[in-house]
Image (spheres, rainbow, N blue to C red):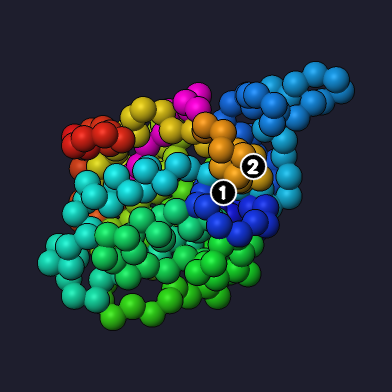
Amino acid sequence: MTRAGGRKPSTAEPSSTTTQTGQKGNGAIRGDLAPKVEGRRSSAFPRLEHEHFVEEPWVSRRLIEYLGIDAELRWGRGAALLDPAAGFGHIVRSARALGLTAFGTDLVKRSAGVGGGRDFLDPGYSPPRAEGPLSIFCNPPFGLLRQFTEKALALADDRVAILTHARRLAAARWLESLPLARILYVTPRPSMWPGFLYRQRVEAGLPLGAGREDFCWLVFEVGRAYRGEAGWLRRDGEGR
């Protein structure tokens, strides 16, 4: 996903997360796609304007399955999901595949079905209209976690789910004042490649490989009290 200062590179297909200009990546680049810096391999992903980082498709699919979002019965008739940092559209496609109405916007258009030129943190941003309650799920720019979370909670009617580094939680005391229901640790560690490298690897048929960092979903329930229950979201099997 992307946002002013936290935007993504232009491309047109897979799905993703986003990062602000100057934000760090999630580990060393491996293999033949690793860029060289002054004759040596870079120890971090290169920082490009509007770059974004891409979560694997199963990360959002498993969350939606876990929450039972495929059933209109659970969310109510006309319920919809918005990803305001949609990148390559993984979250949007996962939701649609499970029968949910889903919309995607981003600062930079990177995929068919995702509206570009939309800055989620702009005061004038308004979400697409939905017939029923709106939930917001996204993988925001790494350095804009709090801003995206608070804006999403101000706009959503039902649930908000934010993907973030697990290491950020220890210092995130601001979460205690929000309706945080669950912290779901994603296992195994998902890869989180920059968008341009993710696309190159997918197009070349190269494996994405194991991730180097721990990530988790923060799941909020609008209008509820803080609970902060913890569990695991597993790629294969039940997520508890």
Image point 65% across, 56% down: which residue? 11
What residue sits 56% from the left and 49% below the top? Answer: 18
Residue at the right extreme, as displayed: 38
Q: Is residue 178 above or below residue 29?
A: below
- The crowd level at tag 1 (other Cα within 10 Å; few <14, some 14-19, many 20+) is many
Direction front: furthest residue: 205
Residue 91 visible, this orientation: yes
Examine the image and state in which quarter residue 26 appears: top right
- Cβ atoms at labels 1 and 2 below 8 Å apart: no
The residue at the point 69 percent across, 31 percent down is 33
Magenta: main secondary structure: loop
Q: How many marks?
A: 2
- Indicate the quadrant where residue 200 lies: top right
Residue 18, which numbered label?
Answer: 1
Q: What is the x, y in percent for residue 69? A: 23, 58
Q: Residue furthest top?
A: 40
Magenta region includes residue 95: no
Question: Circle 2 is placed at which residue position?
Answer: 200
Residue 147 x, y percent position in the rendering: 50, 53
- Residue 212 forms part of the magenta stretch: yes
Residue 9 marker: none
Position of residue 76 in the picture relative to residue 218 (left or right): left
Q: State the extent of the magenta-drawn residues as a range.
A: 209-218
Query: Which is nearer the eye, 19 or 109?
Result: 109
Q: In the image, residue 79 lies at what x, y percent? A: 25, 71
Three-letter code for the amino acid on which mark 1 is drawn: Thr
- Dot 2 alpha-carbon crowd within 10 angstroms: few under 14, some 14 to 19, many 20 or more: few
Q: Indicate the secondary structure of the residue bearing disc 2.
A: helix
- Residue type highlighted by circle 2: Gln
Residue 155 higher or lower than 197, as above or below = below
Identify which residue is drawn at 21% across, 35% down.
237
The mark nearer the N terminus, 1 or 2, is 1
